[in-house]
Image (cartoon, rainbow, N blue to C red):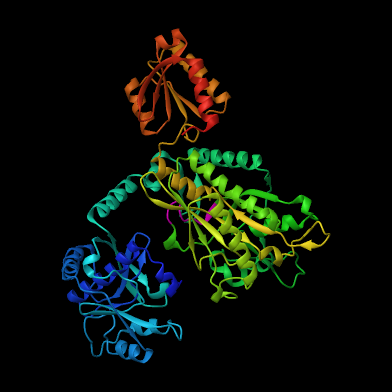
Amino acid sequence: METERKTLDDRSRMTELERIRHSCAHVMATAILRLWPDAQFAYGPPVENGFYYDVDLSHRISPDDFEKIEAEMKKEIKANHTFEKIVVDRDQAVKDAQSGRLGALSERPNNPSKFKLDLLNQIPAGEPISYYKNGDFIDLCAGPHVMRTGNIGAFKLTTVASAYYKGDEKNPQLQRIYGTAFKNKTELEAYFKMLEEAKRRDHRKIGAEMGLYVIDTEYVGPGLPLWLPKGAAIAEELEKLAKETEFAAGYVRVKTPHIAKEKLYLTSGHLPLLYVESMFPPMELKESAEAQVAERYYLKAMNCPHHHRIFAAEPRSYRDLPLRLAEYGTNYRYEQSGELFGLMRVRSLNMNDAHIYCTPEQFAQEFNSVNEMYLKYFKIFGIEKYVMRFSTHDPARLGQKFVNEPELWKQTEDMVRNVLQKSGINYKEIPNEAAFYGPKIDVQVWSVIGREFTLATNQVDFAVPRRFGLVYRDKDNTEKTPLCIHRAPLGTHERFIGFLIEHYAGNFPLWLAPEQVRVLTVGDDEALISYAKLIVQELRASMVRAEGDYSADKINGKIQQAELAKVHTMLVVGARDMQAGAVSVRLHGKGNVGARPKAEVISDILQSIKERKS
């Protein structure tokens, strides 16, 4: 799909780091042109962790070329050229592109700047057209940039990949050169140190080592995880946490089917255009041999339309509100094969979903309670750094990207903004990224090594309940449409467990560990084995995930195996422990913490699990 073009307002909000990276993309283009003057450039934006530039070039760039490209970049930075903005009219811009001057070091007869000509057509009539010039390099660009090339700081090229122009496979395939840049060398080195640690913590690697899940592409399909017993144990613990928390907060649980008629999604507005690319193709079914037309059914890609029909199933009064419908619903979304990534991008997902139907007067309290639930979860999982990205609409795109209800947009955005400000929650406002039916909050969290993840989304919906004809009878006996809050604090099992694997490096806290306790015998004496088995039975009777290793292997080997399996707590029992009614306790990664009475240890294990201690 085509990348959405940034507006001038979007660009004006670029951070200092984004400006450095945007400028570094231009410096990289300058360097590539010095080495390969026939290069044709398309896009060169700053992105989340750096920058890239798409280039059409007969030479196939590889990492082996990075050193000489970086050497040319350093020369341009040392030259300390000014980033000069030049405003031109459309005719002049077209003339310069036709001469090959844009995205180049000089005019190139018979080699027009073909991508720049196309990009010129995307600039709305009346919007200023500008170039940015550093040294000999001139590019079609709305900016912004740093003042001079010497302000760029530290940089490094990272990877090269293939990318279709505008993301459309019908267009030419270009080379995408990625790099990153920071204010100084210290920050750059810290970033690459974090990446090395992230590789060690990669959830795909640790998930395989611990036997948490598999993706069987041959028989089941790409992006469709199979949870193995240990992975399922983590998922069940998360679901248990959510159910307990939501029950205490007044939620009621519902269940919905995995498929629905096309009519459901036509009514919600997800079909025919808005969401069709993210849904699996429909199934067609004739209910009887006499049926002239087949009914079309879709796999459920989201839970909200089903929940709206549950709301509509019974008459509602203002006394029934707020109504909080919760479900760990299984959804199916067609992600492009190239976008699938372990547990982070999948086609089958189990979502910690709920929809809160409320009156406008109840909205602030309900929305704040959802935010408080997030903060509770952050504390449980040791998430110390987070930000809530408050996404609003663009008035110029009402009726296109956003529902054409200007007054309701203003009202609901003001309500969300007020709640965030009064609660003191860390947030930043992002224009033009709301959901089609209302403002939303994307929750960004950072793992212990500083890696950023998108955890979940809150959305305010003032439009779709009306499409479904949802009403409640108010105090004045009139029918009114409720507001709907979509929320999923734990996101999906897949993405959240992927995050937790990397956050903990597989070393889960006791309550969440796939194997919580393993009892290890010192020797294979029958009486000792019986004592160890009784401990396992007592723990399992209290729903502790406990196993025993009663083999004749040496105790050091048993401990090593338990450590490799990331068992949280090891209870070592020998003849003296049995005689004293005790166990020797070892904790994963921490070693021996001493012998204690068996009953005391079991009591502490149960209490730690109950309190979900980290």
Q: Is residue 149 left or right of residue 558?
A: left
| Residue drawn at (33%, 68%) of the image | 162
Residue 28 appearing in the image: yes
Which residue is situated farthest in the front direction here?
A: 422
Q: Nearer the viewer, residue 169 or 148?
A: 148
Residue 587: percent from the left, percent from the top? 39, 26
Q: Please identify the quarter of the rendering in which residue 170 is found.
A: bottom left
| Residue drawn at (50%, 19%) of the image | 535
Q: Is residue 595 left or right of residue 435?
A: left
- Range shown magenta: 341-349
Main SS of the magenta segment?
loop
Q: Is residue 486 left or right of residue 586?
A: right
Q: How many marks?
A: 0
Residue 603: percent from the left, percent from the top? 52, 20
Which residue is situated farthest in the top direction here?
A: 579
Q: Is residue 550 above or below residue 23?
A: above
Q: Is residue 547 above or below residue 78?
A: above
Q: Is residue 575 above or below residue 170?
A: above
Q: Nearer the viewer, residue 300 or 304?
A: 304
Residue 207 appearing in the image: no
Q: Nearer the viewer, residue 541 or 229?
A: 541
| Residue drawn at (47%, 26%) of the image | 547
Residue 412: percent from the left, percent from the top? 62, 62
Q: Is residue 143 left or right of residue 266?
A: left
Q: Is residue 251 magenta?
A: no
| Residue drawn at (32%, 45%) of the image | 200
Residue 497: percent from the left, percent from the top? 47, 45
